Amino acid sequence: MSNIITNFNDKTVKYTQLLSDFKILLKKNSLKFTIQREVILETLYKSDKHLTPESLHHLIKENFPELKTGIATVYRTLALLEDSDMVTSLSFGAQGKKYELGAKEHHDHMICTTCGDITEFVDEEIENRQDSIAHELGFEISDHSMQIYGICKNCKN
Amino acid sequence: MSNIITNFNDKTVKYTQLLSDFKILLKKNSLKFTIQREVILETLYKSDKHLTPESLHHLIKENFPELKTGIATVYRTLALLEDSDMVTSLSFGAQGKKYELGAKEHHDHMICTTCGDITEFVDEEIENRQDSIAHELGFEISDHSMQIYGICKNCKN
DNA sequence: AGATATAATGCAAAAAATTATTATTTAAGA
DNA sequence: TCTTAAATAATAATTTTTTGCATTATATCT
């Protein structure tokens, strides 16, 4: 049996999936799929960083200057995406609110307070434990986030 | 052997300790201990809620109307307290940044996305696991926070 | 206690972030 | 292609946060 080789690598497939989910979501709510919305989703996806509305807007202006996307559209789209659980917002300490795609695999964050670098990780045991706790308290989990702050390997030197 | 009865209940003792820590901190940095700063710390302590700068300011105006504390002072003091790790700021979803006293016992948060209510909890197992993970990644933990989102017992009905 | 130096405050103004308005453009369906 | 309903950019309006400065209050020193 031979392997089938596709044109898509893992990341492409994921984005295609994401985009398709987004389109379905829009259609369900009789909203329209616009270039701006696509560009926002794409930029959010391409960036591994956690973005503020402003930095996201900046990135878009840089990469798609012909679009002249307004900051208000970024805010509106981010709100829409957050409402529909496609992105999550986080706030780490002093810095403002940042957004990241929630459609990526779930993960927690380890944040270096020296260099600001963010490492993502997942731990099965913690995930399970969270479920039990919520269950005990009669709580129906929809999502969760966890951050560990400290000094990373690099900065210790 | 008889028990010694003090004038202070647990909460009073804790606040006294907190206040004293604050005073030491100020002295160390040649900053001054003012009534406003005390009132802010106290209000933060008394409130079990997580407060925005604005709601904190509102509470203070209500409880100490003669002080006429300015919102700018609240912001400045909050920043000072956060810098010195006496309070932590959190941002849950759509709502803005909220502050809580970090000197309380450490705890995680379970947030109801329907009514906005926040339940605090601690789980030994999760705490331990976090330490191990950080250790594995050569990360030196200074702090962490965790939030679980979902629908609380009350709101399910 | 009183005098002095310096930090903190309130107020107001400025800056930054967010939201609303509106005329125009664009997408989706007939 | 035509229609209509939603989305956009641009801008204005709000709201939130920060800053500057004259005045007040605190801590220290005598």
Image: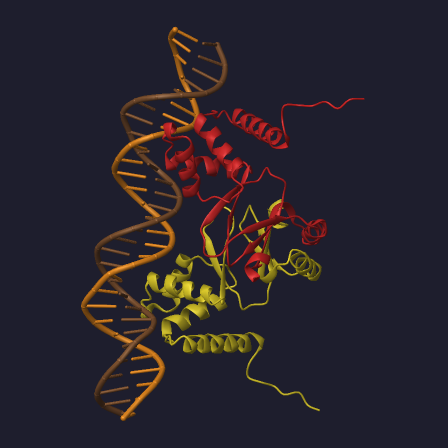
Chain colours: A red, B yellow, C brown, D orange
* Closer-to-camera residue (B59/A111): A111
* Closer-to-camera residue (A57/D7): A57
- The quadrant of the image that shows the C terminus of chain A is bottom right
Q: Residue furthest front?
A: A157
Up the image or down, B45 lies above or below A62; here it is below
Up the image or down, A82 lies above or below B82; here it is above
Q: Is residue A75 visible?
A: no
The residue sitting at 63% across, 29% down in the picture is: A9
Image x and y of residue A123, in percent: 69, 50
Image x and y of residue A109, in percent: 59, 51
* Closer-to-camera residue (A28/B133): B133
Up the image or down, A102 lies above or below B105; here it is above
Up the image or down, B32 lies above or below A11; here it is below
* Closer-to-camera residue (B37/A127): A127
Q: Is residue A46 visible?
A: yes
Image x and y of residue B97, in percent: 46, 54
Image x and y of residue A140, in percent: 65, 46
- The quadrant of the image that shows the N terminus of chain A is top right
The residue sitting at 52% across, 50% down in the picture is: B92
Which of the 4 image quarters holds residue B40? bottom left
Which of the 4 image quarters holds residue B31? bottom left
Left or right: B90 in relation to B4:
left
The residue sitting at 48% across, 26% down in the picture is: A31
